[in-house]
Image (tube, rainbow, N blue to C red):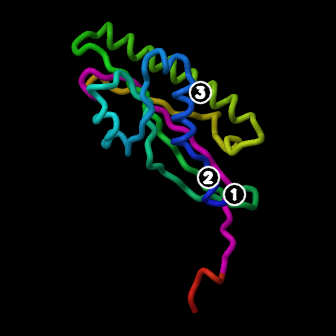
């Protein structure tokens, strides 16, 4: 597997958002961001959209040696956020519950997709998925959670002399 064929997390999760019945029923908008401190598309669409399915377009990674080969492990962060009526804690709880249910459905889809041996999803780590709910003061009038998924893909680290000058 070369770097041109690595798992396309943004495309995968955007398609997932567009096909999930709960996400569609609650108008989750698929978008990207650059981490929790840079929710560009979320903030740009905050007045027009009521919910967000945001995939972080940056990721942490590590190259590791396993079973005689090298793997590139990348961690992707996905934010599920839903607006609620400001200062209405019952509405906030309801919005958070929608995000929790959507996360459960996404996780179950990840488990199913990983079992398909014909795609790059076989490298997903679905056994240990970290999630965290967003605090009350994250963005006024918006709640939700984020989760992190790892993918460890084989990479070719064979030395190629043609890539170097003498």
Mark 2 and mark 1 residues within 8 Å of each other at the beta carbon: yes
Work out whether residue 133 can be spotted: no
Residue 161 to residue 135: above or below: below
The quarter of the rendered structure image containing the C terminus is bottom right
* 80 to the left or right of 151: left
The answer for how far apart the CA atoms under marks 1 and 3 are is: 25 Å
Question: As rendered, which of 128 and 28 lies closer to the eye?
Answer: 28
Q: Please, what secondary structure does the residue beneath circle 2 have? A: loop
Work out whether residue 7 can be spotted: yes
Taking the spot 56% from the left edge, 22% from the top edge, the residue there is 20
**Was residue 145 drawn as part of the magenta stretch in this picture?**
yes
The answer for how far apart the CA atoms under marks 2 and 3 are is: 20 Å
The quarter of the rendered structure image containing the N terminus is bottom right
Which secondary structure dominates the residues rendered in magenta?
strand
Circle 2 is placed at which residue position? 6
Circle 3 is placed at which residue position? 107
Circle 1 is placed at which residue position? 1
């Amino acid at each position: 597997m070369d770097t041109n064929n690595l798992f396309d997390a943004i495309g995968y999760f955007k398609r997932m958002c567009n096909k999930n019945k709960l996400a569609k029923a609650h108008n989750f908008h698929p978008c990207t961001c650059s981490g929790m401190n840079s929710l560009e598309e979320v903030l740009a669409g905050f007045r027009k959209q009521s919910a967000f399915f945001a995939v972080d377009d940056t990721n942490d990674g590590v190259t590791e040696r396993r079973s005689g080969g090298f793997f590139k492990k990348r961690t992707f962060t996905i934010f599920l956020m839903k607006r609620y009526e400001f200062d209405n804690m019952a509405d906030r709880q309801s919005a958070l519950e929608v995000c929790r249910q959507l996360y459960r459905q996404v996780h179950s889809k990840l488990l199913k997709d990983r079992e398909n041996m014909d795609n790059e999803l076989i490298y997903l780590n679905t056994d240990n998925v970290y999630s965290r709910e967003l605090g009350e003061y994250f963005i006024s009038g918006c709640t939700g959670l984020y989760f992190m998924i790892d993918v460890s893909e084989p990479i070719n680290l064979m030395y190629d002399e043609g890539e170097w000058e003498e």
